[in-house]
Image (cartoon, rainbow, N blue to C red):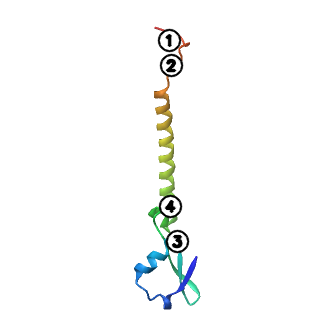
Amino acid sequence: MKTLDIAEATRPLAEYANIVTNEPVIVMSHGKALMALIDLNHIDLESLSLSPDFMEIINRSRERHARACLMNCKLQNLRNMKPDPLTVVPR
């Protein structure tokens, strides 16, 4: 992870955007972290939220979605099953 003092950050923003594709850049001010420049290509924007309430809503939604996908896969597998030829089906 690279650090950069805010006083030395004089290049155009586009140049810093090229740097963060490899690793985050922490912009410092008076020895303290002020902000981070990160590549968002593989990050969902919801994960950037600082609100615990919002993140709880997102996590519950993700869990419901995962359960629904699992149920859908199980149903699809049942539909694709071939009947056992040795099973007697009553008429």
Q: Work out how far the residue at label 3 is from the one at label 2, CA to CA, in angstroms.
A: 53 Å
Residue under pointer 1: 89
Question: In this figure, which residue is indicated by the disc labeled 3?
Answer: 22
- In the image, which is nearer the foreground, mark 4 or mark 1? 1
Query: Tag 4: Cα neighbours inside 10 Å, few (<14), some, or many (≥20)?
Result: some
- Image coordinates of residue 13 in percent, x first then y, are 41, 81
User: What whole-number distance in Å separates the C-alpha atoms at marks 1 and 3?
Assistant: 62 Å
Can you tell which quarter of the image residue 15 is in? bottom left
Q: Amino acid at mark 2?
A: Pro
Q: Earlier in the sequence, mark 4 or mark 1?
A: 4
N-term-proximal mark, 1 vs 3: 3
Q: Nearer the viewer, mark 1 or mark 2?
A: 2
Measured in 3D between alpha carbons, the distance from the residue under mark 4 to the one under mark 1, in whole angstroms, is 51 Å
Regarding mark 2 in the picture, which secondary structure is present there?
loop
Left or right position of 59 against 12: right
Q: Secondary structure at mark 4?
A: helix
| Residue at 53% over, 85% down | 4
Q: Tell me residue 63's x, y (percent).
A: 51, 49
* Label 2 crowd bin: few (<14), some (14–19), many (20+), radius 10 Å: few
Cα distance in 3D space between marks 2 and 4: 45 Å
Nearer the viewer's eye, disc 2 or disc 4? 2
Q: Which residue is mark 2?
A: 83
Q: Residues within 10 Å of mark 3 (few under 14, many from 20)?
A: few
